[in-house]
Image: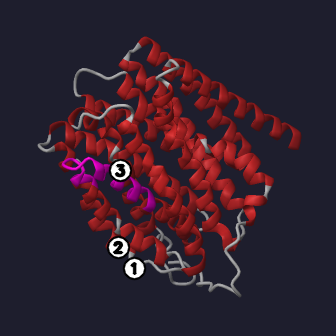
Amino acid sequence: MDKSGASPTRWLPVAVIMFGVGWGANQFASLLGLYTERLHLGGGAAQAMFGVYALGLVPGLALGGPASDRFGRRRVALPSACASAPVTLVLMAGSAVPELLYAGRLLAGVVTGAVLAAGTAWVKELAPGPGVRATALAVSAGFGAGPLAAALVAQWAPYPLVTAYLPHLAIMAVTVPAAMRVPDVRPVRRARGGGGLRLGGLRRPAFRGAIAPVAIWTFAAPTSAFALLPTIVPVQHAPIVHSGLITALTLGSGMAAQPVARRLEARHPRLVARAGLAAVTAGMLAAALTVVLREPALNAAAAVPLGLGYGFVLTYSLGETARIAAPDELAGLTAVAYAVIYAGMFTPLLLTVLAEVVPMALLLTVLSGLAALCLLRTTRQAVFRS
């Protein structure tokens, strides 16, 4: 117990529901190839279903974050987490009515956005020291475990597009009741005099110039590894498991990068950004080589650096956002940061569409060059400000 009599681990149930919501958000990823085959999808339809999730994040983040700043974390995070299981039921119904997959993915984005924005701030207030770190690790663990479990079930269980989602329903049934006992520690703030919710951090050069250009790579990198490459360079045996393993390897690498990122962050936050962008640059080149050689074994060679880049960039983006945010705008500015982060989830769809006229390997090489330019810019900023 701390001096106030509260448990020092009272934040843990909140981090666990964020793990569960992350699981539900990404369990769809390893099933893209199976949906394409079973439902006869084409023209990037599966990637569109994957990417529409990011559209749902916009209202989830934009409303959930500022609302929790005003009304409290519990009142936003818990109802949103409760909605995660019904959204999974919609995805299960999508095996019979494919149009429901778009609705399910959109709703998954709304739920995840609200939980991430409110939950990140809630955990940080419950545990000011390890809060941001616990949040990033919990979400990353859910993102990686969800698609791996879904792939293992779908590869061998009957009715795979239904049974693959059952583990998530079980997780949410256990985790949500435990989180309901966690209190808010920040007093609810009522609106004053009709004034709107302000996000002063958006006007700061530190966000627009130093966080946003780095944060956009957070999901542009890993989704290129697990939502794009396995559909372009598939394997002949157990392809669903292969897709799940690549997803888990990518996001597992991101988790492994985060402790290293924290040590670099103690020296200077820009070191974290530079390490992440360097990994993304190398990973995109490896992805281009994988496409040229059409060798599935090389998927892992691209997945590891792209996953490492994800871990470094996520740690930097959330850490810097929390550092520059005023107390009353913490969840709101975190929501904006997550919106930039998740915009990268449209990368597989964008590349799939552009690949109709430009070779995929060239597109991935261009992305590598863009990441290198961001790295150069971040390095020059660090030099000029040192």
Question: Which residue does the numbered mark 2 point to in the structure image?
Answer: 178
Q: CA distance from mark 3 to mark 1?
A: 34 Å
Q: Which residues are magenta?
A: 91-110
Q: What is the three-letter code of the residue carrying label 2? A: Ala
Residue type pointed to by label 1: Arg
Q: Name the element at disc 2.
A: helix
| Residue 46, horizontal then vertical, whole percent | 35, 38
Q: Is residue 92 left or right of residue 258?
A: left
Q: Foreground: 319 or 339? A: 339
Q: What's the CA distance linking mark 3 and mark 2?
A: 31 Å
**Total number of numbered discs in the rendering:** 3
Q: As drawn, is 285 to the left or to the right of 192?
A: left
Quick check: is 106 in the magenta stretch?
Answer: yes
- Label 3 or label 1, whichever comes before in sequence order: 3
The reply to whether residue 37 is visible in this rendering is yes
**What residue lies at 69% left-to-right and 86% top-to-bottom?**
192
Q: Nearer the viewer, mark 3 or mark 1?
A: 3
Q: Amino acid at mark 3?
A: Tyr
> Which mark sits nearer the N-terminus, 3 or 2?
3
- Tell which residue pokes out farthest to the top in this image: 293
Image quadrant of residue 385?
A: top right
SS assignment at label 3: helix
| Rendered image: mark on residue 181 | 1
* 177 w.r.t. 159: above or below: below
Q: Are marks 3 and 2 in contact (CB under 8 Å)?
A: no
Question: For residue 233, what is the image quadrant?
Answer: top left
Q: Nearer the viewer, residue 351 or 27?
A: 351
**Residue 123 seen:** no
Image location of residue 113, percent across then percent down: 49, 60
